[in-house]
Image (cartoon, rainbow, N blue to C red):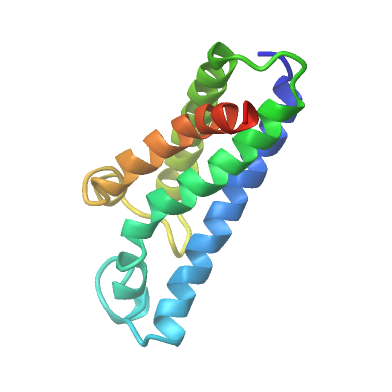
Amino acid sequence: MQDFGMSMLWFWVAYFVVTIIGIMHTIFNIVVLKYSSMKEGPGMGEGYEKTKPWHPLYNIIFFSLFGWLYMRALPDPTMAEALATGAIWVSICIIFDLFGWVLIKHPWSLTFKQFYVEYQPWITLVYIAIFLGPVVGYELSKM
């Protein structure tokens, strides 16, 4: 990896931007569209459930944007660099998600089954989008 520190900066910015957008989308659904919240039913509520199909879209847009910012700043961007960056980004995300959304209990935490089984196919598409973010960013940097 040519610049691990910069790669991590862009990864974490993308991760938190996508997370904040997902939370804001859920709040919008509950407050404006009047979908149920987690207080009113099982699981995360309809407000969150309705956001799931949008999660891969948020991720491909923002991880590609920040992948592009990373790749265009490299002195010698390559497809191999983009693939390695995507593999590192998705690996970190998978591990961080396990701790942040499943193992550490908080009001929005989920069980293993909720996150990895009931969140299908969305979680798989999210992880594919994160992996492809630097690849898309690399292709955009060549334009």
Where does residue 107 sit, x and y in percent of width and height? 45, 65
Q: Is residue 33 above or below residue 124?
A: below
**Splitting the image into 4 quarters, where does residue 126 fall?**
top left
Q: Is residue 134 above or below residue 19?
A: above
**Splitting the image into 4 quarters, where does residue 129 fall?**
top left
Q: Nearer the viewer, residue 101 or 91?
A: 91
Q: Quadrant of the N terminus?
A: top right
Where does residue 103 sit, x and y in percent of width and height? 42, 44
Q: Residue at image x 26%, y 77%? A: 41
Q: Residue at image x 74%, y 19%? A: 3
Where does residue 119 sit, x and y in percent of width and height? 27, 50
Q: Quadrant of the C terminus?
A: top right
Q: Nearer the viewer, residue 140 or 64?
A: 140
Q: Residue at image x 50%, y 65%? A: 23
Q: In the drawing, does residue 12 fall left or right of residue 40?
A: right
Q: In the drawing, does residue 4 fall left or right of residue 79?
A: right
Q: Nearer the viewer, residue 65 or 98?
A: 65
Q: In the drawing, does residue 107 fall left or right of residue 112?
A: right
